[in-house]
Amino acid sequence: MISKSIQSCREAIYRDLQQCRRGTFKLFADIDYDTFCRQAHPDFSPVGWHLGHIAYTEDLWLLQRCAGLEPVFPQYHQLFAADILPKKQRVFLPTLPEVELYLDAVRKKVLDYLEVAPIDEQERLWRFIIQHESQHCETVAFVLQMHRKKEEGRGKKEEGRGKKEEGRGKKEEGRGKKEEGRGNEEGRLISNYRLPIADYQLEITDSQAIEIPRGEFYMGSDAAEALDNERSRHLCYLEAYSIDRYPVTCRQYRDFMESGGYQNPDWWSADGWKWLQGEAVSQPLYWSENPAFNNHPVCGVSWYEAEAYCNFVGKRLPSEAEWEKAASWDATNQTYRIYPWGEEQPNGSLCNHGNNIANTSPVDAFPKGASAIGCCDMLGNVWEWTASTFDAYPGFESYPYRGYSQVYFDGEHRVLKGGSWATFPQALRSTFRNWYYPGVRQIIAGFRCAK
C-alpha cells in the first residue's frame, strides 16, 4: 500500500508538471515559424530549439534512464541534445506543431510512468526536470524580448522614412502615420505584453536603505527541490551591513546616464571600462524613455554596468550571502523563510513572476511580498546581480550531472538572485542561484545596492 506522503508527493509533482507545461505552451501561442527558428543573438539558441530540448531532456532522464524505455522520436536526439550541435546550427527546426507533438508524446509516457515510479527515491530528479523546463522557458521569454527589440528598431527606421515622405500627398502622409504607429510601440516586449503599471510617483532615496545587524543565518537549502549548487545548507556569519529596500529604478539610473556615467572611466573597473569600450553602449539594453517606467527596476544591465552605478552613488553590490540573508532570514524569530514573505507559494499578489505581466512592474507594487527585514521585490520582476562569483557551497556534489553547475565554478561567472517576471514559480525561491558572465546584458537583470 502506498503511503499518504508518497501519494501526496506524486500528486504535487503531477500538478507542477502540468502547471509548468501550460506556461510553456502559453509562451509559444501565435508564434510564427521565422521567430520559432531564428537566433536573436549568437549566444542564444532559437526559441524553438528550447522547446524541443525540454522534451528531449524529459525523455532522456525519466523515460530512458529511470523507466528503461526506448527513446521517443529518436530522430530528434541529435538536434535537441545540449552538447552536439553549435547554436548557429540549431535553426533548422521542425514546425511548432511537430515539436508540440514530440512534447505531448513524451509527456504521455512520463505521466504513465509517474503512476508507478519510486518517487521516494526519484523525487529530486523529478523536481529537477520541472525546474529544467522552467529555466528554459525563461530563456525563451527573454529571447522573444530580444526579437521584439529588433522589431522596434526596424519600426523606428520605418517611422523616419514615413516622416521624410510627409508632404507628398494625403495618401503618402497616411502611410507615414501608419509606420509611425508601428515605431511608437515603446516598451512593448512580447506578444502577451501588458501596459506598464501606473507610476506610483515614489521617491527612492538613500533613506530607503535597511540596516542589518551582524550575526549568523542559514544559507542554501537541502530540500528536495534544491538544485546541486544550492546545497548544502550551512551556517554563515556576516558583519553588519545595509541593503536598499528596493532595486535601483529607472529614475535613479537615469541620473547616472545624464551625469555622463557611460563616458566617465572613474566609475568603472578596469575590466568594466574595457568591456564598455568594446560594446559601445550608452544605456541598458531594455531601456525606455517612457516615464511610466520611472519606478520600475532598471532592466537589461550587465554586472559591469551595475558595478559602475554603485560606484557612482558611493555604494556597492551586495554579496550573495548578504542578499540571501535580507531575503530569507527572520531575525526576530531566528527562522529561515523559503520565500521573503514566508511559506505561501508565489502568487499574483506577492510578486511579479511567471509571465503574468510579461514586463517589469514598479518596485513597490507588491508590499505583501516584503521580507522580514522589510526588503521589497526580492523575488520576481528582475534578477539581481550580486558581487559574488559562482562557486560551490560546503558539501557540494554534482547532480544529476557535472555539467549542470560544476563546470561553471570557474571564477568568472557572477551570481544573480531573485528571479524575474518570466520565472516560473517552481524555480522561484530565496536560495535559488543563477549565474552569467559579467558582460551579459540580454537577461532580465537589474540590481540593488548595499553598503
Image (cartoon, rainbow, N blue to C red):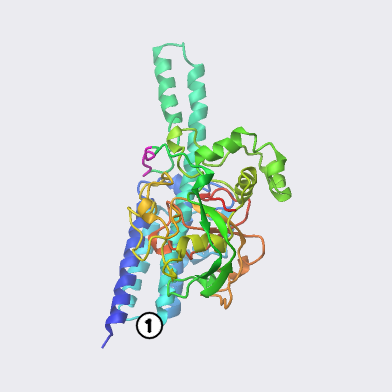
Tell me where residue 336 appears, x and y as whole percent: 44, 69
Is residue 175 at all visible to an observer of this figure? Answer: yes
Tell me where residue 41 appears, x and y as whole percent: 56, 47
Magenta residues, start to end: 192-198
92, 212: nearer the viewer: 212
Is residue 356 covered in magenta?
no
The N terminus appears in which quarter of the rendering?
bottom left
Is residue 45 at all visible to an observer of this figure? Answer: no
Which residue in the structure is indicated by mark 1? 120
Tell me where residue 56 appears, x and y as whole percent: 45, 66
Q: Count residues near mark 1 (Cα–Cα under 10 Å), then give few for <14, some for 14-19, many for 20+.
A: few
Give the residue displayed 36% in from the left and 44% down from the top: 192
Q: Is residue 285 left or right of residue 33?
A: right
Q: How would you classify the magenta stretch by its main secondary structure? A: loop
Q: Is residue 422 left or right of residue 283?
A: left
Vertical order, 321 against 268 (above or below): below
24, 381: nearer the viewer: 381
Vertical order, 172 against 83 (above or below): above
What type is the residue that disc 1 sits on?
Answer: Asp
Tell me where residue 71 appears, x and y as whole percent: 43, 73
Asked which quadrant contains residue 25, the reply is bottom left
